[in-house]
């Protein structure tokens, strides 16, 4: 990214207006109740005591597009609602999940957010969209929290109504850069988009931590049908010195497979290079589809946010899938989007439980989260707790509270843990030259 860093105020006009509005509405409602000497019900979009009404939330993600698609996220959200409702709901309340397709389009993303407001959703949970500038204004104006977004945009780590459960692209790329500091030249192939512009400085922050120079930044169309030219350029950049084995890092989301098809053909004419990427661009399904142990990802390093899918800590998520999404091929337990959605709904459940029999609304959820509520996720993340001015506020990520990543490697065609435990990228990110 280029340009002068802008300073965001934590006090958004929409939030101030909302709280002022709520105060007036509450006072007016109290007066009406007193005059009528009758009990007042809860306001729309909220629930009263346990057993009253329904907790309505929304999950959105792109589907059926030519770029990145995440159909497993809304599909898992619906499965989770069936699963939790069969067990008495959220602390005695029925969970209703609305889903929306953002189509990888700013207009559609804005429509999803407006629908969430119109249908009185108390939160948007476990969602994916690259168009934060389109959807956050509506959510912020209505005071609706965004819990457990995928972490694909900078705004998810700056908005006071965002509660991310992972370190997003910043942590993944910073962690990967640290691991690749022993490579020769490193080429990053990334989308030619505003979101893609954020990636090079993040990867470079990790590389420079290990004493490596910055990466060769290569832009590519996000929805291309072939990447022959980009693959050849990446190989030329990383094999210029025969004494150093370079590394190629594709970060093209769902188009990674298309790039690797071009890369596989082109690499025959060049010395060996290593490949590395981030989870979300590659998973076990992609590795299998590209040849497994004989494919281009063999030996590749990947950074992820969570433990590998074979870890016992995922048993709760797998139970939901087994009981409510068995046979639904959209819901892959190894998909980082599905995993993030599971953790996001865990946060929602525990936040609702913290309210006891009190009212469930966008405001009460936000207040509980902002008041220092600590949420454990069974070891899938560190204990989560959000404060606006956190450790990474100085580099533009005040809401990034989980900078942990895991290192994984493809061995004999299987994605396995390369190292036990998590790596904390907080200090690496603190040194990143990021403008937003």
Image: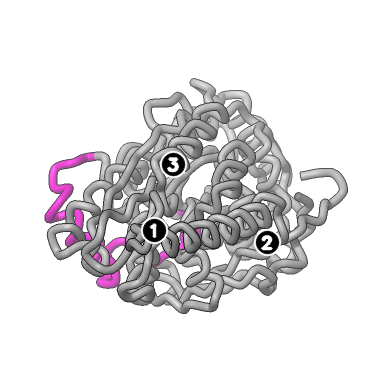
> Which quadrant would residue 347 be assigned to in this image?
bottom left
Percent across and percent down for residue 337 are 39, 50
The local secondary structure at tag 1 comes to helix
Q: Earlier in the sequence, mark 2 or mark 3?
A: 3
Q: Say if 354 sits above or below 134 in the image.
A: below
Crowding near pointer 2: few (<14 within 10 Å), some, many (20+)?
many
> Was residue 180 drawn as part of the magenta stretch in this picture?
no
Task: Residue under label 1, please give it.
Answer: 36
Residue toward you, 11 or 328: 11
User: Which residue is at 48% across, 73% downward?
Assistant: 384
Percent across and percent down for residue 243 are 69, 52
User: Which residue is at 64% across, 71% downward?
Assistant: 426
> Was residue 323 drawn as part of the magenta stretch in this picture?
yes
Asked whether the residues under the numbered discs 2 and 3 touch, taking CB atoms below 8 Å apart as contact, a structural biologist would say no
Crowding near pointer 3: few (<14 within 10 Å), some, many (20+)?
many
User: Which residue is at 33% across, 63% downward?
Assistant: 39
The local secondary structure at tag 2 comes to loop
Please identify, in this view, whether the residue under mark 2 or under mark 1 is nearer the observer: 1
Report the Cα–Cα distance between label 2 and label 1: 49 Å
Residue segment shown in magenta:
300-329
User: Which residue is at 36% across, 63% downward?
Assistant: 37
- Residue 116: image tag: 3
Task: Residue under label 2, please give it.
Answer: 397
């Amino acid at each position: 990214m280029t340009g002068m860093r802008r300073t965001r105020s934590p006090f958004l006009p929409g939030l101030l207006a909302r709280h002022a509005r709520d105060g007036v509405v509450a006072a007016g409602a109290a007066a009406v109740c007193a005059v009528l000497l009758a009990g007042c019900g809860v306001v729309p979009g909220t629930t009263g005591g346990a057993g009253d009404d329904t907790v309505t939330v929304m999950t959105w993600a792109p589907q059926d597009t030519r770029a990145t698609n995440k159909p497993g996220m809304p599909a898992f959200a619906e499965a989770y609602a069936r699963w939790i409702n069969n067990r008495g709901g959220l602390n005695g309340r029925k969970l209703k999940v609305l889903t929306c397709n953002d189509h990888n389009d700013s207009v559609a993303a804005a429509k999803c957010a407006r629908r969430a407001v119109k249908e009185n959703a108390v939160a948007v949970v476990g969602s994916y969209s690259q168009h934060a500038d389109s959807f956050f204004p509506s959510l912020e104006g209505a005071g609706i929290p965004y819990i457990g977004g995928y972490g694909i945009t900078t705004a998810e780590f700056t908005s006071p109504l965002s509660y991310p459960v992972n370190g997003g692209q910043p942590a993944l790329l910073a962690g990967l850069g640290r691991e690749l500091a022993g490579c020769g030249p490193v080429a990053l192939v990334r989308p030619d988009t505003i979101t893609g512009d954020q990636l090079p400085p993040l990867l470079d922050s990790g590389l420079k931590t290990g004493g490596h120079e910055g990466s060769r930044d290569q832009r590519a169309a996000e929805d291309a049908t072939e990447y022959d030219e980009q693959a050849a350029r990446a190989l030329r950049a990383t094999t210029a010195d025969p004494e150093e084995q370079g590394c190629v890092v594709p970060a093209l989301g769902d188009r990674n497979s298309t790039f690797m098809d071009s890369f596989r053909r082109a690499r025959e004419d060049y010395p060996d290079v290593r490949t590395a990427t981030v989870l979300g661009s590659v998973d076990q399904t992609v590795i299998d589809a590209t040849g497994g142990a004989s494919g281009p990802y063999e030996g590749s390093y990947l950074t992820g946010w969570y433990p590998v899918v074979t870890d016992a800590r995922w048993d709760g998520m797998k139970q939901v899938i087994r009981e409510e999404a068995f046979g639904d091929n959209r819901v892959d337990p190894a998909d980082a989007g599905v995993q993030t959605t599971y953790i996001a709904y865990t946060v929602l459940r525990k936040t609702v439980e913290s309210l006891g029999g009190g009212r469930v609304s966008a405001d009460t959820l936000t207040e509980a989260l902002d008041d220092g509520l600590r949420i454990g996720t069974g070891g899938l993340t560190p204990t989560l707790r959000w404060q606006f001015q956190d450790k990474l506020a100085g580099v533009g990520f005040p809401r990034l509270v989980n900078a942990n990543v895991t290192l994984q490697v493809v061995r004999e065609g299987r994605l396995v843990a390369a190292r036990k435990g998590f790596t904390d990228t907080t200090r690496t990110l603190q040194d990143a030259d990021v403008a937003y």
